[in-house]
Image (cartoon, rainbow, N blue to C red):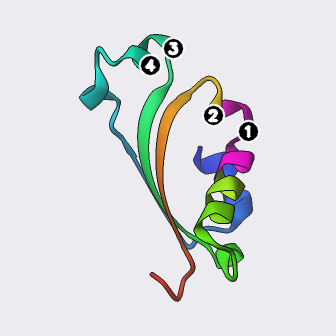
């Protein structure tokens, strides 16, 4: 994830793997993990929340179909912290 998200020029990127909290969950059988992310990037300036999330999803590409089952995103500009 970090490698792919590098193109978004993150000034901060925190990724937490919450997969263990979802053991036995119906989606767990698909092999994808559950993650929580905080990403701070100047590229989010002027974008609404939905557009920021779409940018992250598009950047992760195929990972969203295989390695990632669920992703919670906090996407902020440097001014937002």
Q: Are marks 1 and 2 in contact (CB under 8 Å)?
A: yes
Residue at 49% over, 16% down:
31
Checking the image for residue 27, the label placed there is: 4
Closer to us: mark 4 or mark 1? 4
Distance from Cα at disc 3 to Cα at disc 1: 17 Å
74 sits left or right of 56 in the view = left
First of labels 3, 1 by sequence position: 3
- Residue receiving disc 1: 61
Give, as a single range, the part of the protein colored magenta: 57-63
Q: Are marks 4 and 2 in contact (CB under 8 Å)?
A: no
19 lies above or below 5: above
Q: Is the residue marked by circle 3 packed among few (<14), some (14-19), or many (20+) residues within 10 Å?
A: few
Can you name the residue that lies furthest to the left here?
A: 21
- Residue receiving disc 3: 30
Asked which secondary structure carries label 2, the reply is helix
User: Would residue 66 be counted in the magenta stretch?
Assistant: no
Residue at 74% over, 47% down:
58
């Amino acid at each position: 994830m970090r490698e792919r998200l590098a193109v978004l020029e993150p000034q901060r990127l925190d990724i937490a793997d919450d997969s263990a909290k979802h053991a036995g969950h119906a989606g767990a059988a698909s092999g994808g993990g559950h993650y929580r992310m905080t990403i701070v990037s100047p590229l989010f300036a002027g974008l609404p929340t939905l557009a920021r999330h779409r940018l992250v999803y598009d950047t992760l590409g195929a990972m969203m179909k295989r390695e990632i089952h669920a992703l919670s995103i906090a996407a902020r500009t440097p001014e937002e912290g």
